[in-house]
Each structure stands twice: as C-alpha cells, then as structure tokens.
Amino acid sequence: MPLLQVDGVHTYYGNIEALKGISLTVEQGEIVTLIGSNGAGKTTTLRTIAGVLRPRQGSVRMAERDLTKVPANQIVRMGIAHSPEGRRIFARMTVKENLEMGAYARTDKDLAPDFERVYTLFPRIKERLKQRAGTLSGGEQQMLAIGRALMARPKVLLLDEPSMGLAPVLVELVFRTIQEINAQGMTVLLVEQNAHMALSIARRGYVLQTGTIVLTDTAAKLAQNEMVRKAYLGEE
Amino acid sequence: MRQTLGWWYTATGAARERRVWGTGAVILLALLFPLINGWLHLGWEAKVIPIALFIILALGLNVVVGFAGLLDLGYAAFFAIGAYTMAFLTSTVSPIAFVREGHPVNFFIAMFISAGVAALFGVLLGAPTLRLRGDYLAIVTLGFGEIVPLVIKNTPDLTKGTQGMNPIGYPEVPGVLFAVDPVPWYYLIVVVLLVSVVITGRLRTARIGRAWAAMREDEVAAASMGINLVTTKLFAFSLGASFSGFAGSIWASYLQVIAPEQFDFSVSIFVLCMIILGGLGNIAGVIAGGVLLGGVDRILFDWISGGVHAIGAAIGNQDLQLMDVSRSRQLIFGVALVFMMLVRPEGLFPSARRRAELHAAEELGEGAAQQERAVFVEVEN
C-alpha cells in the first residue's frame, strides 16, 4: 500500500494543460524524485499534491484518504509538508519565528524535540535563531525552509528544487541532510533539476516531459538509462 | 499578571520597567486630563474627545492595515455604519417604529449592537475581496467607502438623507449628565480606548496575530503552514470594523446629529495618516500618531490661526485677520505625508518588523532581494 498515490492527474493553468495525466506512488520511507527540464510539470505536480493547485481530473490519495478536494491549509494537517520552490521563507520574521510558523497547524504544543531535531540537522540555523530570515544566505534559507517543513512533523516531505541557486558545496550539504532526514524514517518526494544529485540519493525516480511521465524506474537504473544520461545528465 | 498582560509584560528587566512606568504615566495622564485641563484653563475638553475617538478608529484600522497587511481606504464606511446603527436604535426619527414611538434601546446595549453590525459589514466587504491584493484591494475598499455615504444620502426614508438624523439617544448613568458635560464622554471614550489597546495588543502576539504576520509576508507560504486565509482575512476585516462601530456609535450620540458627509473619504484618509505617521503595526506608535495628528488638527491650527489673526490686526491686513489655517488642513497633511514617506517611511515609532520591511534593500541580504523578485514574477504570472 503506497503512502502517497497520485492517479491520472490533469492540472491546468487557465486553458493550458500543464499535467496531462500524471500517476505516481510514494512508499513509506522512500525518497522518490521527479526529474525533468524546465516546464515539464515537476513543480505543478508538487503544488497539486500540496493543494495549492486543483486537478481538473484524477485524484491524490494519502494513506487511502482522498486529498483531491482538501484545501491547501488542511493538507499540512494530513501529514504532508511542502517546502516550496524559491524557499518562500518569511523574510521579515526571525529564524525562530519561521520555525514556529512551521508548527502552526499542530495541536500538540510540545515543540522542543522538533526544534532539537532541526538544530541537530542544521547547526547553522541554531546559531541564527534571532536573526531575520531574510538576512540568511541562500543555503541557510534553504535549510530553514526544510527545517520549517519538518516542524509540522509530517509523514511526507515535499521538497521543490532544494538545490536552486546554491553553490555546489552547499548543494552537497543539503542533499546529505535530505538523506539523513530520510534515514530517520521520513518519506520524501523530491523535485529536482539537478538530476545527477537527485538520482544519487533517491530510491526511485520519474522522468517528466511536457506534463507526462515518460519513464520510471529505480534511481540506479535511471542513472544508467541512455535517454536520461543524454537529456538530463549532460552526457554524450 | 503575565497571563492577563500578555506580550506587554513579557520583556524583562529594565525594558519591562520602562514599559510599565511609561504606560502607567500615559494612563494616569489620560485619566487626570480633565483636572489638568481645569487647572491650566486650557479649554480643551471638547477637543480631546474627537482626538481620543479617532485614536479608537486608528487602532481598529491598524488591525486591518498594520497587522494583516490589507490596505483599506474605505474605513470611514464602518464608522458611518456604527453611527447610523446607534441612530436607528435610539433616535426619535429612527425608521424602526418601535424605537420611534418612545422605546429607545439602552445606549450601552446599542453600542455593542453597533459594533456587531459594523463587524458584519466588515465580513460582507471582506468576502468579495478575498482574492484581491495590494492596489486592487485598496480600490475596492475605496469604492465601498464611497458607496456607504451615497446609499445613506439616497435613502431618506430610512436615514433622513442629507438632512441627517437628530436627536440621538444619550447614555444613561444615574447622576451623570451626558447631555451638558463633556467630561463623562471623555471618560467613556478613554475606557473604550484602553480596552481597545488591550485587545489589539494581545491579538498581535496571539496565534491569530502570527497568522496575520505570515499572511502579510507570503500568502502561499502561509497557507502551506496551515493558515486558513479566508477566515484569517475576514477576522481582520470584521475585528477592525467592530472598533469603528464602537467609535461611530459613541460619536453619533456625542454629536447628536449625523449626516452622510461626516463620513466621506477624507475621514478614511485622516485615520490612515494617523497610523502611517505613527508607525504601522505598533500600537504605541498608532496612539502617538493619533495624538499628534489630532492635536495638530484640533489645537495647533487654532493657535496658528490666532497668531495669524493677531499679525493681521497689527499690520492692518484684512486677509490675514480672516484667514483660517485649518481650512488648509488637507494641503498641510498631504505635504506632511509626502515628506514622511521621503524621510521616514516606517513612521515615527515603527514596529521592528515594519521597519525591516521598508528598509529591506539595505538590511536584508541579496538572498532576500532575490526572493522578492521571484515573488513578483510569480504574482505577474
């Protein structure tokens, strides 16, 4: 039984069909990655799952529960936390306040272990708690965005382009941390343009092209696939 | 102590001590003002009433604009709705037959009903504007602010139109003569004002206050955190409106006559100027802005006019002798606002967060500027 199941989803921007029947599954404890070029529909898929966009057809199910009509602000209560494209941290709040906002939907108020978990994963965040989030570097902002999502204590973490705009050394660090979070039992659905890095940590992957899934396999096999190597890994 | 005082008491050490003494001194000054006024023969008793009342309006608008970041240019509409509700419930010219025939509603009950009606209209205005942001929201609220006085003007059967409604019921407290003495009015308004300060101050740091702050920064991210944008926005609108409902109901009874032109666009702008001048989002700043603008408008202009008249008399100039400086108030406030925007856009006493917002470019790093651009691109798409 997959934890997250997307079934034949069609999502539109106005009249433009951005997703033309996407189906995918994420099992408990996996890292699954969606790769593809600009405009393939990766972010749209994630936003549809997160409830920011509504599919016109198809369904999104989480642990057998239909999420298709659940509004975005309830999705997080269903156990799905979304770290959106471009990070979208609250730049004028402090780092601590950002993390507290991440736990906004929680009914239990025992946040101490969650703060501890974020501090252990991202020691640099702990050093900057009182600082305004907008003054952080790009890498620190990305860590904060992931940390904020973790504060909701989700069952599934949706990560949209965590490597965007980061220096290679930071990309390395962020991906190592995602692996670490996964090792603690978190299920991750990862959208990435950096296919090389994404496939190196994921168990399975889906390749998107103009709104459809053209290929799916284990990450190791995708990394060997000739089409993937040519189109997304930049090899000849 | 901490439970009831909330954020106000959370600072520690010297900061808390300063705050306790500062607030205590301001409250004491406010409560003793009628005595001071008498000793010094200031003759300000009738002037401080509208000033204090407009500060209540400013506190309410601050919830909408300062906390929730929803620019409302039609706030006077709720002021009007509060005032007319009071008139409907207590006036001998009320359209409600039962009230007209000698059964006015008790003033204090009517005051709460007025606030409730204004809050209801806050929701009615808020509902269609939920998807609007920034400039677009401002234009719709501006329209609402124009519509309400026009409707009042054009429904003379209900509201007596431009003729206005008069008389309006007085508060009845045994042994207190509201009809002849401004001092009880002053205390009534100060009490409502203090309650407003406590309520808005507590809300700012409460769960809803954090939701407003997050929503103001990024609606999409706020929704992802689990914030229901619909109820959060509507609550801001209706709460803001309820404050002006209280103010409007007191104003109607105090003036004894209300007419639609008392609630035109310039009132909305005047209140907005108070909170921008004082510092959006910061309650002490908003009060300071209200005292300052109200004081300039009601007291300083009179002094200046007096001075100009004296000069005119001394040099024998007729024009100067008859000049009324307060007739140029729109011009003077307009120039002052432009000047403020140029030199200190965050207001005189800004909240820390608002200051950061307006000085984002210099204070925040390149990362934030980049994010800002990304957000703009998203909005344009």
Image (cartoon, coloured by chain):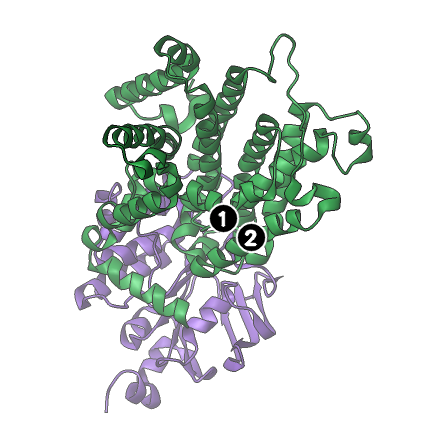
Chain colours: A purple, B green
Vertical position of residue B250 compared to residue B339: above or below: above
Q: Helix or strand or loop: what does disc 2 sit on?
A: helix
Furthest residue in direction bottom, as rendered:
A236
Is there one chain holding both mark 1 and mark 2?
Answer: yes
Residue B151 in view of the camera: yes
Q: Dot 1: few (<14), some (14–19), or many (≥20) neighbours within 10 Å?
A: some
The disc placed on residue A66 is none
According to the picture, the residue beneath numbered tag 1 turns out to be B265
Q: Quadrant of residue B104?
A: top right
Residue B280's spot in the image, x, y percent?
36, 42
According to the picture, the residue beneath numbered tag 2 turns out to be B146
Total marks shown come to 2
| Residues at marks 1 and 2 touching, judged by CB atoms closer than 8 Å | yes
Vertical position of residue A132 compared to residue B367: above or below: above
Q: Residue at x 58, y 36 (%)?
A: B245
Residue B319 in the figure: left or right of residue A62? left
Vertical position of residue B285 compared to residue B5: above or below: below
Residue A59's spot in the image, x, y percent?
59, 70
Q: Dot 2: few (<14), some (14–19), or many (≥20) neighbours within 10 Å?
A: some
Instruction: Tell me the chain of label 2.
Output: B
